[in-house]
Image: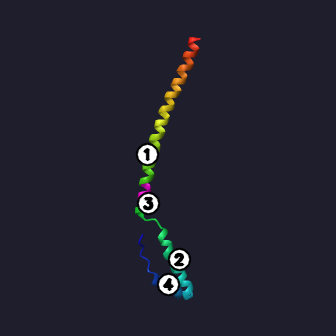
Amino acid sequence: MTTLFDTLKFKKQLTGVGFSQTHAEGMTEAVRDSFENLATKNDLHLLEAKLLFSQGELKNDLIKWMVGLSFIQVGLCLSVVLAFHAG
């Protein structure tokens, strides 16, 4: 990810308010490095698309299991009824 961050301006601002040169450089590096872990809007849209796709797959799997279990329940109920009716 490319972020526009003026490190020289930031370092000058820090030294302008009393930070030492060493501290200002350290803070500047820390802030610049922290930008590497930020997500962009494109990253968030990609994540959203993946989540929606996974959600759809899970929904389809749940429907398949529910239909299958419904057939099993009907079969068990019929076998119990027929077992008592024959006896």
**In what element is the residue under mark 2?**
helix
Residue at point 40% right, 62% down?
42
- Quadrant placement of the N terminus: bottom left
Q: Amino acid at mark 2?
A: Ala
**In what element is the residue under mark 1?**
helix
Q: Which residue is mark 1?
A: 56
Residue at point 54% right, 81% down?
26
Q: CA distance from mark 2 to mark 1?
A: 40 Å
x then y, percent, for residue 81: 55, 17
x then y, percent, for residue 86: 56, 11
Q: Which residue is mark 3?
A: 44
Q: Which residue is mark 2?
A: 30
Number of marks drawn: 4
Say whether disc 2 or disc 3 marks the residue closer to the N-terminus: 2
Q: Amino acid at mark 3?
A: Leu
Q: Is residue 72 magenta?
A: no
Q: Which residue is mark 4?
A: 11
Q: Amino acid at mark 1?
A: Gly
Return the residue nearer the eye: 15 or 50: 50
User: Is disc 1 surrounded by few (<14), some (14 to 19) or many (20+) residues within 10 Å?
Assistant: few
Q: CA distance from mark 4 to mark 3?
A: 31 Å
Label pair 2/1, CB-CB below 8 angstroms: no
Return the residue nearer the eye: 77 or 19: 77
Q: CA distance from mark 2 to mark 4?
A: 11 Å
Q: CA distance from mark 3 to mark 1?
A: 18 Å
**In what element is the residue under mark 4?**
helix
Say whether disc 4 or disc 3 marks the residue closer to the N-terminus: 4
**Does residue 51 sit above or below 36 in this rendering?**
above
Q: Amino acid at mark 4?
A: Lys
Q: Which residues are magenta?
A: 43-48
Say whether disc 1 or disc 4 marks the residue closer to the N-terminus: 4
